[in-house]
Amino acid sequence: MRIPDKVCLITGGGSGIGEATARLFAAEGARVAVVDVDAVNGERVVAQIRETGRPALFVAADVADEAAAAAAVDQVAAHFGRIDVLFNNAGVSAVGDVAQCEPADWDRVMRVNVRGVYLMSHYVVPVMRRQGGGVIINMSSTIAVVGLESRAAYAASKGAVLALTRAMAADHSRENIRVAALLPGTVYTPFVEGYLRRHYADRMDEAVAQLKRRQLNNELMRPEDVAYAALYLASDEARFALGTALVIDGGVSAAKVFA
Ligand SMILES: NC(=O)c1ccc[n+]([C@@H]2O[C@H](COP(=O)([O-])OP(=O)(O)OC[C@H]3O[C@@H](n4cnc5c(N)ncnc54)[C@H](O)[C@@H]3O)[C@@H](O)[C@H]2O)c1
């Protein structure tokens, strides 16, 4: 067991990377709380974890709504008595360059991806302070460090999360609250599959091949590949990972591929 009995609050735990992380953390000994706007999927993940004999809790909340975020943190802390790990994973995307991106889409992406991370951290930090420490993992993306076309709002939001992570590490490391960011490349989740189906409906194979060409290997990254990185950051093994930006991207940011 890598994280025995740790209470781990995972936002967006009803799907994709969050779901894989919830399952892996539970299997590694954690008591998991899934916080998601999607009650059907959130309840499903929690029910499946409970079937394995591990305790788990679902809380329906929009992380970008202040009252809902505060209530979710209260509920998890009251239920388990503490919060050892906060994984700020919930996120949404929008497609388009700055000229194409409508203000409403810009606001929606920034609201969930940046305000959501801020609000959950805002309410969890005092809990961690009271108990003497904890770990906060913020979901950024490789797009925070390498430009990708047609993702203006999403890139801005993930860059903000990376900068916020470093600011939080500077503020809270001495309180024994360890803060780090995860920067995945493209992971084949419902988030990405939905995007490909909407934009490349009749050319899915070509779109998937293009994804792989950006990497240094020829495989699609799975949610579990990121969940294992989150597990490392959540564990005591990562005690020197302060303000760390952990890139898991199949080499996308390491080398330029001329294919
Ligand atoms: N999939 C990728 O290629 C990739 C790459 C880098 C970073 N990321 C980031 O990883 C995170 C998870 O992505 P995924 O691919 O697993 O997505 P996903 O769409 O499969 O899952 C996201 C989950 O977040 C929930 N959610 C959305 N808005 C919410 C809100 N306001 N409050 C609470 N829950 C909310 C959704 O209901 C869903 O269950 C996101 O932050 C995403 O930006 C994804």
Image (cartoon, rainbow, N blue to C red):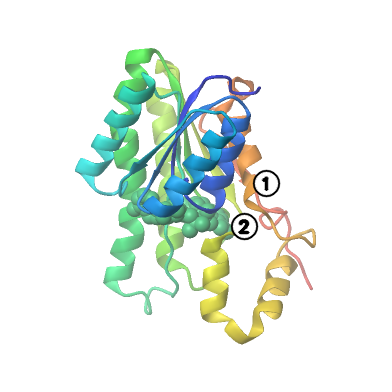
Report helix, strand or loop for mark 1.
Answer: helix
* Vertical side of 240 occupied by 17: above or below: below
Q: Crowdedness of circle 2 by 10 Å Cα count: few (<14), some, many (20+)?
A: many
Q: Residue at x 46, y 60 (%)?
A: 155
* Vertical side of 166 occupied by 65: above or below: below
Residue 158 in sight in this render: no
Q: Amino acid at mark 2?
A: Val
Q: Residue at x 47, y 45 (%)?
A: 13
Asked whether disc 1 touches disc 2, contact meaning CB atoms under 8 Å apart, the reply is yes
Identify the residue position indicated by label 1 in the image.
225
Report helix, strand or loop for mark 2.
Answer: loop
The x, y position of residue 32, in whole percent, is: 48, 32
Mark linked to residue 187: 2
Of labels 1 and 2, earlier in sequence is 2
Residue 115 lies left or right of residue 9; in this view the side is left
The x, y position of residue 89, in whole percent, is: 46, 45
Q: Amino acid at mark 1?
A: Asp
Identify the image quadrant of residue 190: bottom right
Residue 144 lies left or right of residue 236; in this view the side is left
The residue most toward the bottom is 202
Along the viewing direction, whichever of 233 and 25 lies nearer the viewer: 25
The x, y position of residue 242, in whole percent, is: 53, 27
Give the spatial CA distance, label 1 vs label 2: 8 Å
